[in-house]
Amino acid sequence: MGNMTREDIVQQLEQVRRDAEMALSQASNSEQISAWHSEYLGRKGQLTAILRNLGSLSPEERPQVGKVANDIKVALEAELQARQEAIASADLEAMRRAGSVDVTLPGRPQAPGKLHITTRTLRDIYTIFAEMGFQIYNSPEVETDEYNFQLLNMPPGHPARDMWDTFYTTTPGLVLRTHTSPGQAWAMREYAPEPIRVILPGKVYRYEAVDASHESMFYQVEGLAIGKHVTFSDLKGVLMNFANQMFGQGRHARFRKSYFPFTEPSVEMDIDCVICNGKGCPVCKNTGWLELLGAGMVHPRVLQYGGYDPAGFSGFAFGMGPDRMSLQKYGIDDIRYFFANDARMLERV
Ligand code: PHE
């Protein structure tokens, strides 16, 4: 640049200031801001370029022009900061509008987890029997023919085997247990000749035509008490207490004579229908009664197989179906919901 006067330079500075302010008002993001900064205020920016021409001025003029330049620089820096803050708050506002941080929205409710109804019913049963001194005993779901039948007084070919539609496996002599009763033999063989008071919960399997009240897999809870003087009255007392705790005080019950190869005598226990209180309704098929469980005094031969001398020991056993109880207690109309893996099932109750 040739010989520039003080006025020329001040004019240039004023021009740069106007250009810079115009450009700044149009910068709308951080990249544009930093480009703007190097264009006008940077080491290679316009302001610096003009100040390089101060050499053509007299020593008195230089500080005067220098002051003008510095004032412009300070003013532009202040405007830059204001612009940056405006952009930041506009960005925040845009984000809020876009919904990423709308702090004014109410929270979304979280559905709390729930235990499966089967689990709840089983735990209710465990609690009631625990108070009566019964411990939990677990035994296998895949059983031998010996445990599922023979030790329960059903030798090969025994017609009572037809009471259970059995799933056989490809291994001869291995079946899916059709009931929890084989657990009786496991418990007796572990504890004989000590007294026993256990419940045996778990899954059982039957080759059934599946419908609203029949599944091919369901739960049973077996009970077994053995001692020197265990009587049928003990059985009735334990079962009545259970029914009252489980379904409400004042429950009526009846015991019907029945048959199981592993108990003698054998009974089935009914309670008055929990839906209609015995008046008669579709759930109890107008009988006023609901079948609750099978039970009886442990057959002497079963005691013997288990290692107890029937001359000195007696016992009672019972077997109940908690899934049926859940259906009644929670008013569910189809047993297939329990294991259909539909979470809405859990939300219903
Ligand atoms: N195991 C029998 C059933 O599945 C129920 C039962 C258990 C009966 C114990 C008497 C004693 O039907």
Image (cartoon, rainbow, N blue to C red):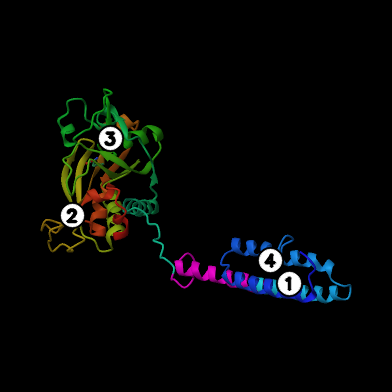
Q: Nearer the viewer, mark 2 or mark 3?
A: 3
Between disc 1 and disc 3, whose residue precedes?
Answer: 1
Disc 1 residue lies near ligand 1 with CB under 8 A: no
Q: Nearer the viewer, mark 3 or mark 4?
A: 4
Residue type beneath disc 3:
Arg
Identify the disc placed on residue 73: 1
- Write down the quadrant of residue 148 in the picture: top left
How many neighbours does mark 2 have within 10 angstroms: few (below 14), some (14-19), or many (20 or more)?
many
Residue 228 percent coordinates (x, y) = 35, 40
How far, Cα to Cα, is label 1 from label 4? 9 Å
Q: Amino acid at mark 1?
A: Lys
Q: Hey, which quadrant is residue 43 in on the image? A: bottom right
Q: In this picture, which residue range is highlighted in magenta?
A: 81-106
On screen, residue 349 above or below 217 = below
Res 193 seen here: no
Horizontal and vertical percent for residue 14? Answer: 70, 75
Amino acid type of the residue that numbered disc 4 sits on in the rendered structure: Tyr
**195, 63: nearer the viewer:** 63
Residue with the mark numbered 3? 177
Decide if residue 50 is on the left or right side of residue 207: right
**Circle nearer the viewer, 2 or 1:** 1
How many numbered callouts?
Answer: 4
Marks 2 and 4, how far apart in space?
A: 92 Å
Circle 4 is placed at which residue position?
40
Q: Any atom of ligand 1 within 8 Å of the CB at mark 2?
A: no
Residue 91, horizontal then vertical, whole percent: 54, 68
Residue occupied by mark 2: 290
Q: Of marks 3 and 4, which one's residue comes earlier in the chain?
A: 4
Q: In terms of sequence position, does the residue under pointer 2 or pointer 3 come before the other?
A: 3
Q: Residue furthest right?
A: 59
